Image (cartoon, rainbow, N blue to C red):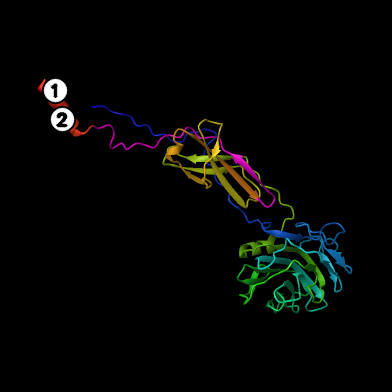
Amino acid sequence: MRFKVLLISFLTIASSVFSAPVSQAVVDLNSGLVVYWNFENGTDVGYSAVGGISLSPYGTPAYTPAGGGHNGGRGLLLDGSSWLSTNNPITNLPLGAHPYTLSAWVNPSGGSAVGGIIAYGTASAQNLGNNLRFNGMTAIWHYWYANDFGMEIYPDTFLNSWHHITSTWDGTVRSLYCDGILKSSDTPTSQPNFTAGSLVIGRTLNDANLTGTLDDIAIYDRALSQSEITALASTGISAVVTPPTISSAAITGNTRVGQTLTAGTIGASGTISTTTYQWQRSEKFGTGYSNIPAAISQSYLLVPKDSEKYLRVIVTIGNTSGTVSATSTPTVRIAEAAKDESKGDKKPQKDEDDKKSVVLSR
Protein backbone atom coordinates (compact mmCIF):
# COMPACT_ATOMS: atom_id res chain seq x y z
CA MET A 1 0.00 0.00 0.00
CA ARG A 2 1.27 3.39 -0.91
CA PHE A 3 0.83 6.46 1.24
CA LYS A 4 0.89 10.08 0.20
CA VAL A 5 1.44 12.97 2.58
CA LEU A 6 -0.93 15.84 1.91
CA LEU A 7 0.61 19.18 2.83
CA ILE A 8 -1.78 21.99 3.70
CA SER A 9 -0.44 25.51 3.25
CA PHE A 10 -1.34 28.13 5.79
CA LEU A 11 -0.38 31.77 5.74
CA THR A 12 3.07 32.27 7.27
CA ILE A 13 4.24 35.48 5.68
CA ALA A 14 6.44 37.10 8.29
CA SER A 15 6.47 40.87 8.75
CA SER A 16 4.46 41.59 5.61
CA VAL A 17 1.14 39.78 6.01
CA PHE A 18 -0.19 39.64 9.54
CA SER A 19 -3.27 40.27 11.63
CA ALA A 20 -4.19 43.91 12.03
CA PRO A 21 -7.35 45.73 12.96
CA VAL A 22 -9.10 47.65 10.21
CA SER A 23 -9.55 51.34 10.98
CA GLN A 24 -13.08 52.39 11.78
CA ALA A 25 -14.63 55.45 10.17
CA VAL A 26 -15.43 58.35 12.46
CA VAL A 27 -17.96 61.16 12.19
CA ASP A 28 -16.68 63.65 9.61
CA LEU A 29 -18.55 66.92 10.02
CA ASN A 30 -16.79 68.25 6.92
CA SER A 31 -18.36 65.64 4.63
CA GLY A 32 -20.76 67.45 2.31
CA LEU A 33 -19.83 70.85 3.76
CA VAL A 34 -20.38 73.38 0.96
CA VAL A 35 -19.63 76.64 2.73
CA TYR A 36 -18.76 77.67 6.30
CA TRP A 37 -18.29 81.03 8.00
CA ASN A 38 -16.54 80.94 11.38
CA PHE A 39 -16.16 84.75 11.64
CA GLU A 40 -12.57 84.56 12.83
CA ASN A 41 -10.68 85.92 9.81
CA GLY A 42 -9.14 89.31 10.52
CA THR A 43 -11.25 92.24 9.34
CA ASP A 44 -13.01 90.53 6.41
CA VAL A 45 -16.35 89.73 8.06
CA GLY A 46 -17.68 88.07 4.90
CA TYR A 47 -14.80 85.61 4.53
CA SER A 48 -15.79 81.91 4.32
CA ALA A 49 -13.39 79.44 5.94
CA VAL A 50 -14.70 76.74 3.58
CA GLY A 51 -16.30 77.09 0.14
CA GLY A 52 -14.81 80.27 -1.25
CA ILE A 53 -18.01 82.35 -0.87
CA SER A 54 -17.02 85.72 0.57
CA LEU A 55 -19.96 88.03 1.22
CA SER A 56 -20.05 91.81 1.04
CA PRO A 57 -21.08 93.87 4.10
CA TYR A 58 -24.18 96.06 4.04
CA GLY A 59 -24.52 98.57 6.85
CA THR A 60 -21.98 97.98 9.61
CA PRO A 61 -21.74 94.24 10.35
CA ALA A 62 -18.69 93.61 12.54
CA TYR A 63 -16.77 90.99 14.43
CA THR A 64 -17.45 90.82 18.14
CA PRO A 65 -14.47 91.10 20.48
CA ALA A 66 -12.77 87.83 21.40
CA GLY A 67 -15.13 85.83 23.55
CA GLY A 68 -18.22 87.30 21.89
CA GLY A 69 -18.89 84.15 19.88
CA HIS A 70 -20.57 81.04 21.18
CA ASN A 71 -17.34 79.11 21.84
CA GLY A 72 -15.02 81.76 23.21
CA GLY A 73 -13.99 83.02 19.79
CA ARG A 74 -15.58 85.85 17.86
CA GLY A 75 -18.95 86.11 16.15
CA LEU A 76 -20.82 88.31 13.68
CA LEU A 77 -22.43 91.30 15.40
CA LEU A 78 -25.50 92.79 13.68
CA ASP A 79 -27.31 95.99 14.72
CA GLY A 80 -30.67 95.49 13.00
CA SER A 81 -29.75 97.37 9.85
CA SER A 82 -26.71 95.35 8.77
CA TRP A 83 -26.17 92.08 6.93
CA LEU A 84 -23.86 90.16 4.60
CA SER A 85 -24.88 89.41 1.04
CA THR A 86 -23.94 88.59 -2.54
CA ASN A 87 -26.07 88.97 -5.62
CA ASN A 88 -23.76 86.79 -7.70
CA PRO A 89 -25.18 83.39 -8.65
CA ILE A 90 -24.02 80.80 -6.08
CA THR A 91 -23.93 77.61 -8.12
CA ASN A 92 -22.27 75.37 -5.52
CA LEU A 93 -25.19 75.60 -3.07
CA PRO A 94 -27.81 72.81 -2.86
CA LEU A 95 -30.16 73.91 -5.65
CA GLY A 96 -33.45 72.60 -7.01
CA ALA A 97 -34.77 69.87 -4.70
CA HIS A 98 -31.32 68.71 -3.59
CA PRO A 99 -31.03 67.67 0.11
CA TYR A 100 -29.35 70.17 2.41
CA THR A 101 -28.53 71.19 5.98
CA LEU A 102 -28.44 74.76 7.28
CA SER A 103 -26.62 75.26 10.59
CA ALA A 104 -26.02 78.34 12.76
CA TRP A 105 -25.38 79.49 16.30
CA VAL A 106 -27.74 82.34 17.17
CA ASN A 107 -27.98 84.90 19.98
CA PRO A 108 -30.58 87.61 19.26
CA SER A 109 -30.58 90.66 21.48
CA GLY A 110 -33.89 92.25 20.47
CA GLY A 111 -35.08 94.26 17.51
CA SER A 112 -37.39 92.67 14.96
CA ALA A 113 -39.10 89.46 16.10
CA VAL A 114 -38.71 88.01 12.60
CA GLY A 115 -35.03 88.72 12.04
CA GLY A 116 -33.45 86.50 9.42
CA ILE A 117 -30.54 84.11 10.02
CA ILE A 118 -29.58 82.88 6.52
CA ALA A 119 -31.27 82.54 3.14
CA TYR A 120 -30.49 81.91 -0.51
CA GLY A 121 -32.36 81.63 -3.80
CA THR A 122 -35.14 83.85 -5.12
CA ALA A 123 -38.12 85.33 -3.28
CA SER A 124 -40.30 85.87 -6.36
CA ALA A 125 -42.30 82.62 -6.37
CA GLN A 126 -43.16 79.61 -4.23
CA ASN A 127 -40.34 77.17 -3.33
CA LEU A 128 -37.59 79.20 -5.02
CA GLY A 129 -35.96 80.44 -1.81
CA ASN A 130 -34.52 78.69 1.25
CA ASN A 131 -35.04 80.87 4.32
CA LEU A 132 -34.36 80.46 8.04
CA ARG A 133 -35.48 83.15 10.48
CA PHE A 134 -36.91 83.88 13.92
CA ASN A 135 -40.64 83.90 14.52
CA GLY A 136 -40.62 85.70 17.83
CA MET A 137 -38.01 85.05 20.49
CA THR A 138 -39.26 81.51 21.25
CA ALA A 139 -39.63 80.15 17.71
CA ILE A 140 -37.80 79.52 14.44
CA TRP A 141 -39.51 79.68 11.05
CA HIS A 142 -38.18 77.71 8.09
CA TYR A 143 -39.74 78.46 4.76
CA TRP A 144 -39.32 78.01 1.04
CA TYR A 145 -41.39 81.08 0.33
CA ALA A 146 -45.08 80.28 0.88
CA ASN A 147 -44.26 76.70 1.93
CA ASP A 148 -43.46 77.09 5.60
CA PHE A 149 -43.17 75.37 8.96
CA GLY A 150 -41.57 76.11 12.32
CA MET A 151 -40.64 75.09 15.84
CA GLU A 152 -41.15 76.45 19.36
CA ILE A 153 -38.80 76.28 22.36
CA TYR A 154 -41.26 77.96 24.77
CA PRO A 155 -40.94 78.52 27.74
CA ASP A 156 -37.26 78.84 26.86
CA THR A 157 -36.22 81.86 24.84
CA PHE A 158 -33.58 82.67 22.26
CA LEU A 159 -33.27 86.21 23.57
CA ASN A 160 -29.77 87.01 24.88
CA SER A 161 -28.71 83.36 24.92
CA TRP A 162 -26.79 81.10 22.56
CA HIS A 163 -28.62 78.27 20.78
CA HIS A 164 -27.64 76.00 17.92
CA ILE A 165 -30.20 75.81 15.09
CA THR A 166 -30.18 73.18 12.34
CA SER A 167 -32.65 72.74 9.49
CA THR A 168 -32.50 69.76 7.12
CA TRP A 169 -34.23 68.42 4.02
CA ASP A 170 -33.55 64.82 2.94
CA GLY A 171 -35.66 64.85 -0.22
CA THR A 172 -38.84 63.84 1.59
CA VAL A 173 -38.87 65.27 5.12
CA ARG A 174 -37.62 68.60 6.42
CA SER A 175 -36.74 69.00 10.09
CA LEU A 176 -35.76 71.64 12.63
CA TYR A 177 -33.40 71.02 15.54
CA CYS A 178 -32.50 73.17 18.52
CA ASP A 179 -29.27 72.41 20.39
CA GLY A 180 -29.06 69.03 18.67
CA ILE A 181 -32.61 67.98 19.57
CA LEU A 182 -35.33 67.42 16.95
CA LYS A 183 -38.15 69.90 17.57
CA SER A 184 -40.30 69.76 14.44
CA SER A 185 -40.60 68.00 11.09
CA ASP A 186 -43.02 67.79 8.19
CA THR A 187 -43.48 66.29 4.74
CA PRO A 188 -44.05 69.20 2.34
CA THR A 189 -46.79 68.86 -0.26
CA SER A 190 -44.50 70.26 -2.95
CA GLN A 191 -40.77 70.04 -3.65
CA PRO A 192 -38.35 72.97 -3.42
CA ASN A 193 -36.78 74.42 -6.54
CA PHE A 194 -34.07 76.67 -5.14
CA THR A 195 -32.31 78.98 -7.58
CA ALA A 196 -28.74 80.26 -7.69
CA GLY A 197 -29.95 83.78 -6.97
CA SER A 198 -28.60 85.68 -3.97
CA LEU A 199 -27.32 84.61 -0.55
CA VAL A 200 -27.71 86.61 2.65
CA ILE A 201 -26.67 86.26 6.29
CA GLY A 202 -28.37 88.29 9.02
CA ARG A 203 -31.67 88.52 7.17
CA THR A 204 -33.83 86.47 4.81
CA LEU A 205 -34.44 87.24 1.16
CA ASN A 206 -37.04 89.92 1.89
CA ASP A 207 -37.56 89.93 5.70
CA ALA A 208 -36.46 92.12 8.57
CA ASN A 209 -32.82 92.22 9.62
CA LEU A 210 -31.47 90.54 12.76
CA THR A 211 -30.33 92.33 15.88
CA GLY A 212 -27.86 90.14 17.75
CA THR A 213 -24.93 87.84 17.11
CA LEU A 214 -24.46 84.88 14.74
CA ASP A 215 -21.62 82.38 14.63
CA ASP A 216 -20.41 79.26 12.78
CA ILE A 217 -22.88 79.34 9.90
CA ALA A 218 -22.70 76.35 7.56
CA ILE A 219 -24.49 74.87 4.55
CA TYR A 220 -24.22 71.17 3.62
CA ASP A 221 -25.33 69.53 0.38
CA ARG A 222 -26.85 66.62 2.32
CA ALA A 223 -29.16 66.10 5.28
CA LEU A 224 -27.08 65.41 8.37
CA SER A 225 -28.18 62.52 10.58
CA GLN A 226 -29.37 62.92 14.16
CA SER A 227 -25.99 61.75 15.50
CA GLU A 228 -24.13 64.18 13.25
CA ILE A 229 -26.34 67.08 14.32
CA THR A 230 -25.77 66.16 17.97
CA ALA A 231 -22.01 66.16 17.31
CA LEU A 232 -22.25 69.44 15.37
CA ALA A 233 -24.01 71.15 18.30
CA SER A 234 -21.49 69.68 20.73
CA THR A 235 -18.11 69.90 19.02
CA GLY A 236 -18.63 72.20 16.04
CA ILE A 237 -16.80 72.19 12.72
CA SER A 238 -13.07 72.20 12.23
CA ALA A 239 -12.31 74.64 9.45
CA VAL A 240 -9.15 72.75 8.52
CA VAL A 241 -9.24 69.01 7.92
CA THR A 242 -6.01 67.27 6.95
CA PRO A 243 -5.90 64.06 4.94
CA PRO A 244 -5.59 60.89 7.05
CA THR A 245 -2.33 58.98 7.32
CA ILE A 246 -1.54 55.30 6.87
CA SER A 247 1.68 53.37 7.48
CA SER A 248 0.97 50.24 5.47
CA ALA A 249 -1.65 47.76 4.32
CA ALA A 250 -1.81 44.13 5.41
CA ILE A 251 -3.41 40.83 4.41
CA THR A 252 -4.62 38.01 6.63
CA GLY A 253 -5.92 34.59 5.66
CA ASN A 254 -5.07 31.19 4.14
CA THR A 255 -3.20 31.40 0.84
CA ARG A 256 -4.92 28.47 -0.86
CA VAL A 257 -7.51 28.51 -3.63
CA GLY A 258 -10.98 28.35 -2.11
CA GLN A 259 -9.94 30.30 1.01
CA THR A 260 -10.56 34.00 1.80
CA LEU A 261 -8.01 36.78 2.28
CA THR A 262 -8.85 39.95 4.21
CA ALA A 263 -7.29 43.40 3.85
CA GLY A 264 -6.48 45.69 6.76
CA THR A 265 -4.50 48.82 7.61
CA ILE A 266 -1.51 49.49 9.82
CA GLY A 267 -1.02 52.86 11.51
CA ALA A 268 -4.07 54.58 9.99
CA SER A 269 -5.01 57.81 11.76
CA GLY A 270 -6.97 61.02 11.33
CA THR A 271 -10.51 61.55 10.10
CA ILE A 272 -11.41 58.62 7.83
CA SER A 273 -14.68 58.88 5.92
CA THR A 274 -13.94 56.51 3.01
CA THR A 275 -11.99 53.25 2.66
CA THR A 276 -11.55 51.46 -0.68
CA TYR A 277 -9.71 48.31 -1.74
CA GLN A 278 -8.13 46.99 -4.94
CA TRP A 279 -6.73 43.46 -5.12
CA GLN A 280 -3.95 42.72 -7.62
CA ARG A 281 -2.35 39.57 -9.06
CA SER A 282 1.04 38.78 -10.62
CA GLU A 283 3.00 35.84 -12.03
CA LYS A 284 6.11 37.06 -10.20
CA PHE A 285 6.74 38.10 -6.62
CA GLY A 286 7.08 41.87 -6.29
CA THR A 287 6.58 42.93 -9.91
CA GLY A 288 4.10 42.95 -12.77
CA TYR A 289 0.92 43.33 -10.72
CA SER A 290 -2.40 44.16 -12.39
CA ASN A 291 -5.85 44.81 -10.98
CA ILE A 292 -8.19 41.86 -10.53
CA PRO A 293 -11.52 42.96 -12.07
CA ALA A 294 -14.27 43.63 -9.50
CA ALA A 295 -11.97 42.66 -6.60
CA ILE A 296 -12.68 45.84 -4.63
CA SER A 297 -14.03 44.53 -1.33
CA GLN A 298 -12.19 44.16 1.95
CA SER A 299 -12.29 40.37 1.56
CA TYR A 300 -11.23 38.34 -1.48
CA LEU A 301 -12.05 34.69 -2.24
CA LEU A 302 -9.14 32.96 -3.95
CA VAL A 303 -10.16 31.34 -7.27
CA PRO A 304 -8.42 28.73 -9.48
CA LYS A 305 -6.96 31.52 -11.63
CA ASP A 306 -4.96 32.66 -8.57
CA SER A 307 -3.17 29.31 -8.25
CA GLU A 308 0.63 29.65 -8.47
CA LYS A 309 0.27 33.47 -8.50
CA TYR A 310 1.10 36.19 -5.97
CA LEU A 311 -1.49 38.68 -4.62
CA ARG A 312 -1.35 42.06 -2.96
CA VAL A 313 -3.92 44.72 -2.03
CA ILE A 314 -3.99 48.52 -2.26
CA VAL A 315 -5.97 50.20 0.55
CA THR A 316 -7.01 53.85 0.11
CA ILE A 317 -8.45 55.95 2.94
CA GLY A 318 -9.73 59.50 2.63
CA ASN A 319 -11.79 62.44 3.83
CA THR A 320 -12.88 65.76 2.40
CA SER A 321 -9.28 67.01 2.23
CA GLY A 322 -7.77 64.15 0.29
CA THR A 323 -6.86 60.47 0.15
CA VAL A 324 -3.79 58.36 0.88
CA SER A 325 -2.98 54.80 -0.21
CA ALA A 326 -0.79 51.95 0.96
CA THR A 327 0.13 48.72 -0.80
CA SER A 328 0.62 45.49 1.12
CA THR A 329 3.66 43.24 0.73
CA PRO A 330 2.72 40.39 -1.65
CA THR A 331 1.51 37.06 -0.36
CA VAL A 332 3.47 33.85 -0.79
CA ARG A 333 2.66 31.83 -3.90
CA ILE A 334 -1.01 30.85 -3.84
CA ALA A 335 -1.44 27.08 -3.49
CA GLU A 336 -3.88 25.08 -5.58
CA ALA A 337 -7.10 23.90 -4.00
CA ALA A 338 -6.77 21.05 -1.50
CA LYS A 339 -7.56 17.61 -2.91
CA ASP A 340 -10.23 15.38 -1.45
CA GLU A 341 -8.24 13.07 0.83
CA SER A 342 -11.04 10.51 0.89
CA LYS A 343 -10.35 9.71 -2.77
CA GLY A 344 -6.57 9.72 -2.60
CA ASP A 345 -4.81 7.44 -5.12
CA LYS A 346 -6.98 4.41 -4.57
CA LYS A 347 -7.39 2.14 -7.59
CA PRO A 348 -10.75 0.67 -8.50
CA GLN A 349 -11.29 -2.70 -6.88
CA LYS A 350 -11.67 -4.31 -10.33
CA ASP A 351 -8.11 -3.29 -11.24
CA GLU A 352 -6.75 -4.89 -8.05
CA ASP A 353 -8.69 -8.09 -8.75
CA ASP A 354 -7.36 -8.20 -12.30
CA LYS A 355 -3.81 -7.88 -10.99
CA LYS A 356 -4.37 -10.76 -8.60
CA SER A 357 -5.83 -12.89 -11.35
CA VAL A 358 -2.80 -12.25 -13.51
CA VAL A 359 -0.45 -13.33 -10.72
CA LEU A 360 -2.44 -16.44 -10.05
CA SER A 361 -2.47 -17.45 -13.71
CA ARG A 362 1.29 -17.40 -14.03
The structure residue drawn at horizontal position 66% and vertical position 61%, both measured from the top left corner, is 231
Q: Is residue 149 left or right of residue 205?
A: left
330 is within the stretch colored magenta: yes
Q: Is residue 259 left or right of residue 78?
A: left
Nearer to me, 53 or 201: 53
Q: Is residue 333 visible?
A: yes
Say which label, 2 or 1, has the lower sequence index.
2
Q: Position of residue 145 (x, y in %)?
A: 72, 76
Amino acid type assigned to the residue bearing label 2 in the image: Asp
For mark 1, give the secondary structure. Answer: helix
Q: Position of residue 338 (x, y in %)?
A: 37, 37
User: How far apart are labels 2 and 1 at the CA level?
Assistant: 10 Å
Of all residues, the one furthest to the right in this rendering is 60
What is the count of numbered marks? 2
Query: Circle 1 is placed at which residue position?
Result: 359
Residue 348 image-quadrant placement: top left
- Classify 10 Å Cα crowding around label 2: few (below 14), some (14-19), many (20 and above): few
Nearer to me, 304 or 259: 304
Query: Circle 2 is placed at which residue position?
Result: 353
Amino acid type assigned to the residue bearing label 1 in the image: Val
Q: Position of residue 285 (x, y in %)?
A: 53, 30
Q: Position of residue 336 (x, y in %)?
A: 41, 35
